[in-house]
Image (cartoon, helix red, strand yellow):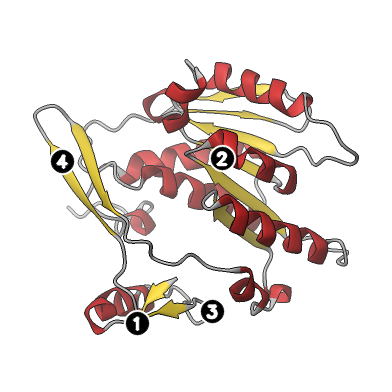
Amino acid sequence: MLSSLRMYQVLIDDLKARGIIIENCPTCDQHAPFATVILTKSTKTRNIINCNNNFPYVSIEDFRKLDLSKYGWIHMRALYFDKMLTIVKEFAAYNATREEKIILSIEFDANLEEMWPLIDYCDYAFFSKQLAQTNGWVSTEDACMQLDERLRMRWGLNLKRPYVIVLWGDQGSGFMDLHGKYTHVKPYKPKRIVDALGAGDTFVGSFIYAIYIRERSLPVAVDFGNRMASYKCTKNGYDHIAKILLPPKL
């Protein structure tokens, strides 16, 4: 959902300048929510103050306007359970009519108990370290083992089991295949962290690129995600990410 108010035109211009397709995004005439990020260099900490003003979320009606035949992978963040459940159910019904399925990935970073039923519909499930404290996870392996137990405890016919990827910052990442086999992938720690905001999003985008566009294996894709997330932290923003293979200027 995008705001059509004039003061947010700078965001629209920025998206278009970066080649991000927004023609399918619904709009409203409300002020968009925002976040203030406070970086403390001395302690290397980051605090985020969110302002949520009940900005509308995309609806099933918005989803139905999409030409799904143009999509090969759809990624969602687990928010607003009732709305998302309606969307993923309709998505699953559409996929059932296709020989070549659209891949669905969902990112879980809050309210896992409420959002858990969405797991039945996705092919890849990403879990954030932010869930560790509320769920008693102490490491990537512990998180994967507990998630594996929850997946095995489900009941029903033809339940889909997703690949599970757990992001754990400076501990790297852990993942499980469709049989519950756990693998840890080491982190890449930059010499100096400048800006870690969005490192998780960078990982997810890089992972999808590696799996879907480059057709790499799951371990290679997770490793690539770790590398790119680490590189993102070395500078402010995101413009430098695409230049990772360019030689440094002398």
Whether the residues at callouts 3 and 2 have beta carbons within 8 Å, the answer is: no
Mark 1 or mark 2, whichever is nearer to me: 1
Q: Earlier in the sequence, mark 1 or mark 2?
A: 1
Local packing at callout 1 (Cα closer than 10 Å; few below 14, some 14-19, many 20+) is some
Whether the residues at callouts 1 and 2 have beta carbons within 8 Å, the answer is: no
Which amino acid type is marked by label 3?
Answer: Asn
From mark 3 to mark 2, how far is it between C-alphas?
25 Å
- Residue at label 2? 126
Q: Earlier in the sequence, mark 1 or mark 4?
A: 1
Mark 1 or mark 4, whichever is nearer to me: 1
Where residue 196 sits: x, y (%)?
A: 28, 41
From mark 3 to mark 1, how far is it between C-alphas?
14 Å
Provide the secondary structure element on which disc 2 rests: strand
Whether the residues at callouts 3 and 4 have beta carbons within 8 Å, the answer is: no
Mark identifier at residue 4: 1
Q: Is 95 above or below relative to 130?
A: below
Q: What is the quadrant of residue 95 in the picture? A: bottom right
Which amino acid type is marked by label 4?
Answer: Leu
From mark 1 to mark 4, how far is it between C-alphas?
30 Å
Mark identifier at residue 119: none
Let me know if residue 57 appears in the view: yes
Local packing at callout 4 (Cα closer than 10 Å; few below 14, some 14-19, many 20+) is some
From mark 3 to mark 4, how far is it between C-alphas?
34 Å
From mark 1 to mark 2, how far is it between C-alphas?
31 Å
Looking at the picture, tell me which residue is in the foreground, 230 or 196: 196
- Residue at label 3? 24
